[in-house]
Image (spheres, grey):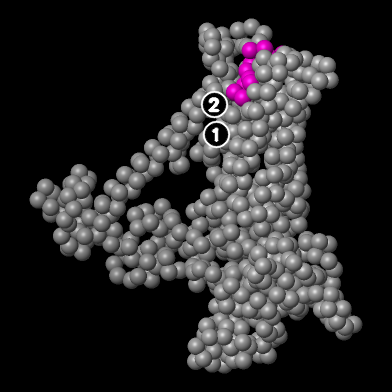
Amino acid sequence: MLLDALLLQLGYNATLVAIGAALLGTAAGITGTFLFLRKRALVSDAVSHATLPGVCIAFLVMVFLGGDGRNLAGLLLGSAVTAGIGLLCMNWLTRNTRLAEDAAIGAVLSVFFGLGIVLLTVIQTLGVGRQAGLEGFLLGSTAGMLYSDALVIAGGGAAALVMILLTRRPMTLVAFDPEYATARGLPVERIDMLMMGLVMAVTVVGLKIVGLILIVALLIIPAVTARFWTERSEHVVLLAGLFGGLSAYVGAALSASAPNLPTGPIIVLVSFAFFALSLFLAPNRGVLAAVLRHLKFQRRVHLRQGLLALAQGHAIYESLTLRLLRRAGLVRADGVATERGRARASKALRDERRWEVVRSDMAHEAAAALYDGLRDIETVLTQDQIQEIDRQIGGPHEVLS
Amino acid sequence: MTVTLANISAEEEACIAKSPLSIRGLTVTYGEKPAVFSVDMTVQPGQMTAIIGPNGAGKSTMLKAALGIVPPVSGRVQVFGRPLEEQRARIAYVPQRASVDWDFPTRVIDVVLMGLYRELGLLGRIGRSHRAKAMDCLERVGMGDFAERQIGQLSGGQQQRVFLARALAQGADLYLLDEPFAGVDAATEKAIISVLKSLREAGKTVVVVHHDLATVVEYFDNVFLINTRRVAEGTVAEAFTEATLQAAYGGRLATTQIDKLARV
């Protein structure tokens, strides 16, 4: 069943939803990355909650104009208007009052959402139009998705992506160093507004599938997931698009494979699964890698300290150090150094002196930056350089190793 | 402020036209408290100028306001005799290194390439010549071997040199540096000052917000002393004296200290 869903074999609606979701996920992942890099992730949460009154007002307007109030484009237009107002309110509060951005986010989010819920309740008691399904915008509802709905989503997502392609450089520069960007004459405020505008577009377009409460997850989780795997912003952007698209596609397929699985929340859970995997398994930044690195580092520290102690004839008190030395065949069971242990110890001591020279000489700066008290000097310098340093140190040139 | 502006004589106007950076009547306030009050400054072309003053005297704020990073309450800023906005391409600004997040996902070379922003435009591809130029700037600050490293792995001094390399990449005529020597190692300080001196030799103008009074005489041609208001401005010999230091720092420096500094 799941395989059928993944291969788009579950019928027209499921296929439409899966493709629409994948497009939305990609657009949200890419757009959200800039938000994440600019450290304004939560602004999107306020923007998305501010869409609700707009949806309700647009519905009422359309009903009073004689329609049934369910035209998606009309509802999205309304949501964009109030989301934009919410965004302007937040900007104004942050810039012109002493409120910090987090407080402004809290105020706008709750007030706009509260107003939206009031309007929603009023609409339900009015009993006008075909209001059934309006609350689907809260958590998304894909059951009755139409081809035209999918087109709106695809069009909106594609437009956002084109804008990002055009403005990725200034947006990255502003995210990294807004003061420098200002000094260079970049219109930082307008770039920020554009970024938020794109976020708003993605939010509005995503209302139908994930709903306004969870869209923040689709904007942010792919970006933080991608960050685990790379140190380059352009790769974070691409990976976030990939993670976003993939989670949305798999999530939509999963929810189609069994009855009564809500699409939006499942998509969020799938993207969380990618996040959790990355959190633990990513090389370098992942938790597992960090733990392993620490343990390995600790062993090297003990081994090195042990060797230096041996070379200088000091006693070794730590049992871990002794155990590691013994296991490496560097000391005998009674704590006396073996032949090999003595050789390694005298090399360790000599390397310490060599490092001292390296670290005091600007010519070796790049090498010295790698100094951690443990690294073998041969991994950063050539034999010629080491011989040159040995000449400076003096003493025996033959070092046992 | 109009008073100050109206009083600008023809002679002074000529001076402003020649100056790489001239500031008239600049006031910046945080809330109601002025950080910089009605300051005039005329930077001399092709020389190195230090902006000095006690902590909280408005040194960095003045620089930021001159560049439009902090909105001034009043004041006129001209760059090479023209309004600031027309001359942005001729200015290279080096912000304090603590002003950015060094865990940002980017490599050293990418930061320097940001200096080529105008050349690259929105969609231009980063070509071999851009990369070569960026590498050249990194070599000039002694960071050529670090190009591919993630910026989070750099020491404070190395971060500062990367920022300087980014400014060099712009090929500007006026260099404004905010506390480039704060908290850096001696090797970095030497590398930076030699780059700045080579810029001066090439006819560029350098303005540095500086905190270390002990090196003023050795490094700079001119000083600008500020403590919210302008205290003194001129060559090191004229303006870096016992009297001006006393006026700028007041009781913050011991008299013996001032004696020693001004006499170097």
**Where A292 falls versus A180 (above or below)?**
above
Membership of A28 in magenta stretch: no
Residue A353 higher or lower than A10, as above or below: below
Are there few (<14), some (14-19), or many (20+) residues within 10 Å of tag 1? Answer: many
Q: State how far apart marks 1 and 2 are (Cα).
A: 8 Å
Judging by the rendered image, the residue that carries numbered circle 1 is: A221
Residue A372 in percent (x, y) is at 38, 56
Asked if the residues shown at circle 1 and circle 2 are in contact, with their CB atoms under 8 angstroms apart, the answer is: yes
Give amino acid for label 1. Answer: Ile
Q: Which residues are magenta?
A: A135-146
The residue sitting at 80% across, 74% down in the picture is B1
Chain designation of label 1: A
Q: Is residue A10 left or right of residue A327?
A: right
- Residue A106 in the image: state x and y as whole percent: 58, 42
* Main secondary structure type of the part rendered in magenta: loop
- In the picture, measured across the screen, residue A78 lies left or right of residue B149, that is right
Residue A49 in the image: state x and y as whole percent.
63, 33
Does A137 appear in magenta?
yes
As helix, strand or loop, the secondary structure at mark 1 comes to: helix
x, y (%) of residue B70?
Answer: 69, 62
Question: Which residue is depicted at the point 71% across and 18% down?
Answer: A126
